[in-house]
Image (cartoon, rainbow, N blue to C red):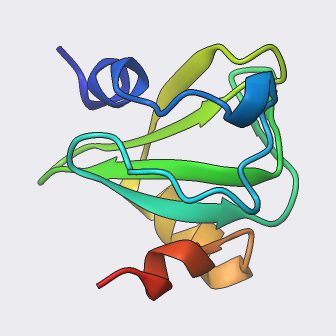
Amino acid sequence: MSNADDIAQHCPPPANGSSSYRRRRTRPPLGGREFELCGTLVLDGKRVPMGVCWVKQSAREVALAWRSADGAALARDIAPSMLRQLLDEGVLRQAASANARK
């Protein structure tokens, strides 16, 4: 199973049937880190909605997971260099709720 399949399988459900996670604390999927998507990102022709997403990283792979507007768990494998680029450009940043956890 790839990182993308694994992280999508464990995405937390949307709050109250919506895909908005802004004010809700959620547990990241197994081995994932919580991030906030602050800009436009299109992967494989699908727009990733702004809000909370999760990144799971292994030695050679990076997977990005999110919930679609209809609540479906989606994930894509991305290159480690793409993750660095998204972080450097400010499109992805560590979620505030992740910073508040102990």
Where residue 16 appears, as percent x and y from the top left, is 75, 30
Instruction: Decide: is 24 above or below 19.
Output: below
Q: Quadrant of the C terminus?
A: bottom left
Q: Quadrant of the N terminus?
A: top left
Instruction: Decide: is 49 above or below 18.
Output: below
Instruction: Decide: is 13 above or below 53.
Output: above
| Residue at x 87% of width, y 52% of height | 40
| Residue at x 49% of width, y 51% of height | 26
Asked whether 20 or 35 is in front, the reply is 20
Instruction: Decide: is 15 above or below 27.
Output: above
| Residue at x 55% of width, y 64% of height | 35
Where residue 24 appears, as percent x and y from the top left, is 65, 56
Q: Is residue 41 rendered to the left or right of residue 7?
A: right
Residue lying at the far front of the rendered structure: 16
Asked whether 24 or 34 is in front, the reply is 24
Asked whether 90 or 72 is in front, the reply is 72
Residue lying at the far left of the rendered structure: 59
Q: Is residue 102 rendered to the left or right of residue 35?
A: left
Where residue 60 appears, as percent x and y from the top left, is 18, 48
